[in-house]
Image: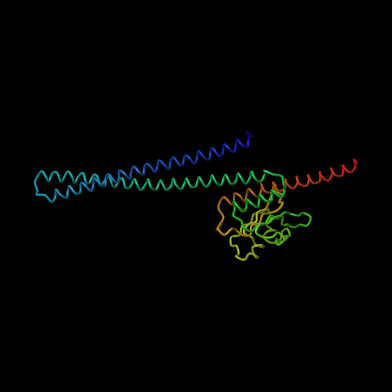
Amino acid sequence: MSIQDTEEKGKKTEHLERGEEFLEMFRKGQEFTQDLLKENERLRFQVVHLEEVVKKELEAPDSGQQSSMSKDLSEKLGQYEVRLSELKSRLSEVEAENVDFAQRYIDVEEQNNNLANLYVASFQLHSTLDYQEVLQIILEIIINLIGGEIFAIYLRDEKAKTLNPEAAEGVAISDVLRIPLGEGVIGQAVLANESYFNDNPSEDLAELYTNPLVCIPLTIQDDVIGAIVLFQLLQQKVTFAPVDFELFTLLAGHAATAIFSSRLFTESKRKLSTYQGFLDLLSK
């Protein structure tokens, strides 16, 4: 088993243990609530029974013994009512705790899922050196994990000083225009190496192509090699979740590294093939 497999197994085990711990706390809270409900019901029954006894005693002909008995029963009734009131208060507290445990469990489950998604995305990005496959993986991450519907991947052309569309989803790549470096929202974000988030996006898709929802520069150390530009989300995606911003951060660095490495590998492989063909011609 490799170190990576061991680390992955360790993370999964840790996540499962945390989930089981919260489940156990939640189960104990449920059991305690059930016990309190049973005790509550028992006391209610005793209170009703004592009330009936007191009522009968009060309606019966008066006597010293009956008066004494009624007084005793009234005292017991008062004690049971106090106990019942305390139990109701405790039950409310436990129910509130159960709601808190349930919410914490949901939060932990969501966090575990988010961590798993981040790990899978990172692993996929570095699982291949095929350039086109890397681009496709990035597209799938944006669709499946972020909920992007229309977006594009731009790469920087140092000679032309432009950002050229390299891959796109939801729109033909021929319809995605080149962007001069430093011009417009996208060009400025890339030149400044700063992510851009549109707080008030337009409903007009044509305007979103120049003022998008999100622009994430792809950086290797301090060098920007391109950008991921998100124009429109899926209909069921209302807003960004905290994990989306973590994915944006991951893509900013890991996607850039994966693209850069795969391009170098693909180009070197192509050049090697060309050199090998040339040497074969010379050797004939």
Q: Is residue 161 above or below residue 43?
A: below
Looking at the rendered image, the quarter that the C terminus falls into is: top right
Q: Is residue 85 found left or right of 65 in the rendered image? A: right
Q: Position of residue 126 (x, y in %)?
A: 67, 44
Looking at the rendered image, the quarter that the N terminus falls into is: top right
Residue 221, can we see it? Answer: no
Residue in the foreground of this view, choosing between 52 and 65: 52
Q: Position of residue 227 (x, y in %)?
A: 68, 54
Report the residue that reaches farthest toward the top.
1
Name which residue lies at 27% across and 45% down: 43
Q: Position of residue 200 (x, y in %)?
A: 59, 62
Q: Position of residue 189 (x, y in %)?
A: 67, 56
Name which residue lies at 74% across and 58% down: 162
Q: Is residue 225 found left or right of 241 in the rendered image? A: right
Residue 267, can we see it? Answer: yes
Name which residue lies at 61% across and 45% down: 120
Q: Is residue 126 found left or right of 31 in the rendered image? A: right
Q: Is residue 253 above or below residue 214?
A: above
Residue in the foreground of this view, choosing between 110 and 280: 280
